[in-house]
Amino acid sequence: MVTEYIEKRVSSTVKKFREEFRKNVVTAMLAAFAFIIALAWRDAITDIINEFVKDLNITEGIYAFRILYATVITIISVIGIIAISRWSEEKAAEEASSRAKKIKE
């Protein structure tokens, strides 16, 4: 009886650990891919701005363009973070609602 209880507890703990481990690995992998994508876009945008500056023969205001670039990227990133956060909160609320319904049944 005690042995069965211990086996169930250990099995349950191992299962929870595996689930959390898998979630964290997936999150880390997605973050790595997102980082690679961000670097690719960074290079592309930087090249476009450099060509734009070269075509207009603007060498004195390069820092202003870099600040503008950083500002635009920051605004886009903040909007993305807000959208993802809201989506994540909605998903968590749906899961909580689903769990509550299961408990009531």
Image (tube, rainbow, N blue to C red):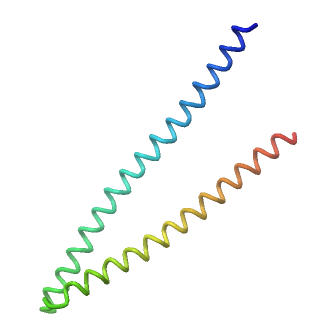
Work out whether 52 lies above or below 28: below
Q: Residue at x 64, y 59 (%)?
A: 89
- What residue occupies the far right of the structure in this picture? 105
Viewer-side residue, 65 vs 33: 65
Residue at 56% x, 34% y is 19
State left or right for residue 24 relative to residue 5.
left
Horizontal side of residue 19 vs 55, given as left or right: right
Does 92 sit left or right of 58 as displayed? Answer: right
Q: Is 64 in front, or is 27? A: 64
Number of labels in the image equals 0
For the N terminus, the quadrant is top right
Closest to the observer: 69 or 98?
69
Q: Quadrant of residue 43?
A: bottom left
Q: From the viewer's perspective, is residue 94 above or below residue 78?
A: above
Which residue lies at the image location 87% right of the left edge and 42% below the top edge? 104
Could you say which quadrant of the image residue 48 lies in? bottom left
The image shows residue 101, relative to residue 78, as above or below, that is above
Q: In the image, residue 70 lies at what x, y percent?
A: 32, 77
Dividing the picture into quadrants, the one containing residue 99 is: top right
Q: Where residue 80 sits in the image (x, y, percent)?
A: 48, 68
Where's residue 67, x and y in %?
A: 29, 82
Please determine whether, in this image, residue 43 is positioned above or below residue 103. Answer: below
Q: Residue at x 33, y 63 (%)?
A: 38
Q: Quadrant of the C terminus?
A: top right
